[in-house]
Amino acid sequence: MEGGAGPVKSVRRQLSWALALAIVAVALMGSALSFLAAYDEARELQDDVLRQIAQLVDARQLRAQPQPLDGHFLDRDEAARVVVQSLGAPNPEGLHVDAGGALPLPTTLGDGLHTLELNGESFRVLVHRTAGGERFAVAQESDLRDEMARASAWRTVLPFALLMPVLLLVVADLVRKLFRPIARLAQEVDQRSEAQLHPVSEDGVPGEVRPFVHAINRLLARVQHSMAEQQRFIANAAHELRTPLAALSLQAQRLEQTALPPAAAERLAELRTGMERSRHLLDQLLGLARAQAAGSAPDAPQSMQALFREVIQDLLPLAEAKGIDLGVQGMEGTQDAQVQAARADLSMLLKNLVDNAIRYTPAGGRVDLSWSEQGGELLLQVRDNGPGISQEQRAQVFAPFYRLPGSGEGGSGLGLAIVQALAERMGARVVLDWSNPQQRRGLCASVLLPRAVA
């Protein structure tokens, strides 16, 4: 069995080629039939001319003898001449027919039309019998007749030659328009995020493709149900684990109030630190589950000043524990900005950015929050003077449970994953850069809220 996928087959290209080949084949066949029919008809008309000349000679009892050609006829095209002579007409001078001599027609020639080779030339000959029983011949060279018949036949082929390219272009355009809804559907599905699992619209989709669209919608429904079950499990598990952790924390707190040997007190402190990390991990798991769930409906316009104040108040104890200066930068006298979005989502997004900055900034550092208008978008920024994130690792830090190697921080690795999930749900963009590009130090996390949100 050969490995790998085979070459991709395009139905549109195959259909276009099949229709093009069919059109060319039919056009060539039609041209050939039309050419043959027109050629035979032209030959028949030329034979009718010979019959009419014979009837005219018979009706007017004209002399059916060749005459010497004068200067007037010698200047004319010899192929256009029609020779009228009696069968067995003498040619004592032995003149060629072009010089006015008689054609050497056999007297045994039957009545009707014949094609004969005479004097090295082809002639179309009509033998006519008069009412008195006399027989004479009306002859014309075949070269001119054939040339005229072919010219007439080629004129019937000309429409096929002109219309076939036009028909090919029309068919190509029709095929492209017929497949346009499918291309638009593929583009719409391709531009979705992993959280957008609503059914694919069937508007404008051809009936032959609708079963495939129905299958995709059923698959999306199953994936959505599976993701909802996973998120529900994570949320329930984290919620259920909070109660025993809270009880353990309470027991550890009571134990601290008891006089313990130094070794036991040290072990108890390590236990309290582990339980605090576990509590923080559970909170982050709950936050990630909420961020990946269906988005909340936008609330009333939110004040950025009030939102920043709330975030700082919630995380100020963590910053003070590390001696970090946490505040809003450059907002004195700046007009407040209003954001039309779910307050819980914005608050969670900012808290995770600020929490991440505090945890990875060394003691005595600085974390600044700011906002500004930029090209119709609202730019939110969280800056710190910590080690920052290298350009090679910026795409990886948004993955769940990813921790920067060598950072020494025992975080959960979910903060930026929650930020990314919330930003995608709101249609925002998250950009990571250096706070100090010259020294390649510090992290500047920027969130660009679109015009529809900001």
Image (spheres, rainbow, N blue to C red):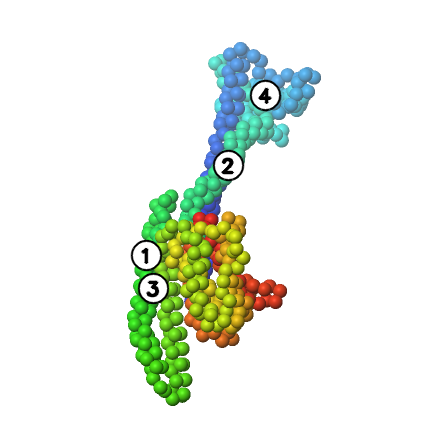
Q: Secondary structure at mark 1?
A: helix
**With respect to residue 222, does 242 lie above or below?**
below
Q: Nearer the viewer, residue 105 or 330?
A: 330
Marks 1 and 4, the one that precedes in the sequence: 4
Viewer-proximal residue among 280 and 123: 280
Q: Residue at x 61, y 21 (%)?
A: 81
Image coordinates for residue 253, horizontal then vertical, percent? 34, 78
Q: Nearer the viewer, mark 4 or mark 3?
A: 3
Which tag, 1 or 2, sits closer to the chain's start? 2
For the N terminus, the quadrant is bottom left
- Image disc number at residue 82: 4
Kindly indicate whether the residue at mark 4 contacts the one at mark 1 (C-beta within 8 angstroms): no
Using the numbered discs, state the Cα–Cα distance from disc 2 to disc 3 in whole angstroms: 58 Å
Element at badge 4? strand
Q: Position of residue 307 (x, y in %)?
A: 43, 57
Q: Which residue is mark 2?
A: 166
Q: CA distance from mark 1 to mark 4?
A: 87 Å
- For badge 4, the amino acid type reads Val
The extreme top residue here reads 60
Question: SS for tag 2?
Answer: helix
